[in-house]
Amino acid sequence: MKVWGVMIGVILSVAGIVEDAIPYPHATLSAQNPPPQLASPLQSVALSDDSVEIGDRFDLRLELRLGPDEVAFFPDSLAAPGIEPFDAVAWGAETQADGSIVLTISYPLLAYQTGPVLVPDFDAFVAPRAEALVAGYADDGELVGSWDAFRAAPARVPSARLLGVPPRQVMVATVLGLDDITTQITPRPPADLSGGNRDWLSTLLLAVFGVLLSGIAVSSTRDWMRYRARVPPPPPPTPKERALAALAEVEASGMHADGRLRVFYSDWSEAVRRYVESFQTAWGPAWTSTELMTDLQGPRRSAAVERSVGPEEIAGVMRTAEEVKFGGVRPDPEAALGHLQRARGWIEGSDPGGPAAGAPTSSAPRTPVSEEGSP
């Protein structure tokens, strides 16, 4: 009986094993036809460099394949311990032959921690454009929607698909050499800067350029101060000022008191002549005093003469001067000084401004004669 029991047990065990090994027909059909699944829009995720130095820029790049009527949502920047965004995210799109769109996304990053640094995982989303338009998260024709608006209320786009972007690791190397790392970095002692171990070439160049710049600064400052302190040259004297100065010099000479009347009258009448000649360019030294006084009182005298005070007054004084110079008239000193003062008063009261140019007018042509030949 025991033998038969053992045999029956062995037969039952073998039958169970065979039953488990032969699949049922419906199970085989289910395995051959799995339920259909949508392909992930996330095509690839990669780093621009696997190893960088601290402070160097590197990029995290990913590709999304969008349908013609889909919109993508992804963060504007990435940040994590050891890395920070170098700039905002950049992306570009390329339309494929089947109508789909490949979106290339690039996150520029900056590493500031040495060793292995992990670029964190994050979520991106792909949603139908119609739902994004209704929610106000994207405009018509856009491929990328507003991440801030979507993150605030993702439920308004119920058909959005989650795309998990996996983390990536980058090795960040230090800029220090092996000797610096093993021996540590210590500041240079003061003796290396102020003692004999300094770089003498650099010190010499620094001293030369320092002296040169100081000289330029001092020279420029001196020139500027000299320019500020300069006195502009005085303007040239006017004809009236020259005439009055000449009369003052003749009066101070005292020639009228010591009997040199002819020289006295010649000098101050010459000063009056030069002043009257400034009224009109046609009047020059070739005219005698008599002719000049005639033109001064003529019907077409200049505008400056019209503005003067009493041309007849100066004409009478000048006639007396002619009589003294070329005749035998010898007035006493007081009368001679009075004639000079009358000439000076006429000059002070005249206005030579705006002289009018033109030839003098006379009823008969005249021939220039010298002062000595005047009657």
Image (tube, rainbow, N blue to C red):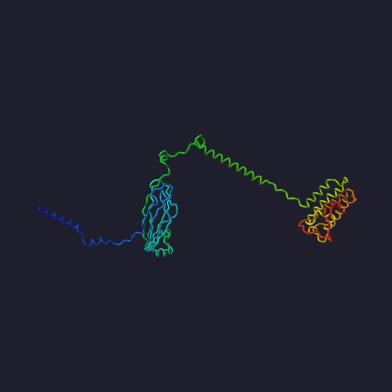
> Between residues 59 and 264, which one lies in front from this camera angle?
264
Q: Where is residue 119 drawn, in percent x and y? A: 39, 51
210 on left or right of 360: left
Q: Where is residue 132 drawn, in percent x and y? A: 41, 63
> Between residues 330 and 130, which one lies in front from this camera angle?
330
Q: Where is residue 241 drawn, in percent x and y? A: 78, 51
Q: How many marks?
A: 0
Identify the residue at the far left of this view.
1
**153 over 255 or under it: above or below:** below
Q: Could you say which quadrant of the image residue 300 lies in?
A: bottom right
Residue pictured at 25% horizontal, 61% vertical: 32
Q: Quadrant of the C terminus?
A: bottom right
Q: Where is residue 313 drawn, in percent x and y? A: 85, 56
Residue pictured at 68% horizontal, 46% vertical: 230
Residue pictured at 80% horizontal, 49% vertical: 246
> Between residues 27 and 32, which one lies in front from this camera angle?
32
89 on left or right of 230: left
Identify the residue at the far front of this view.
367
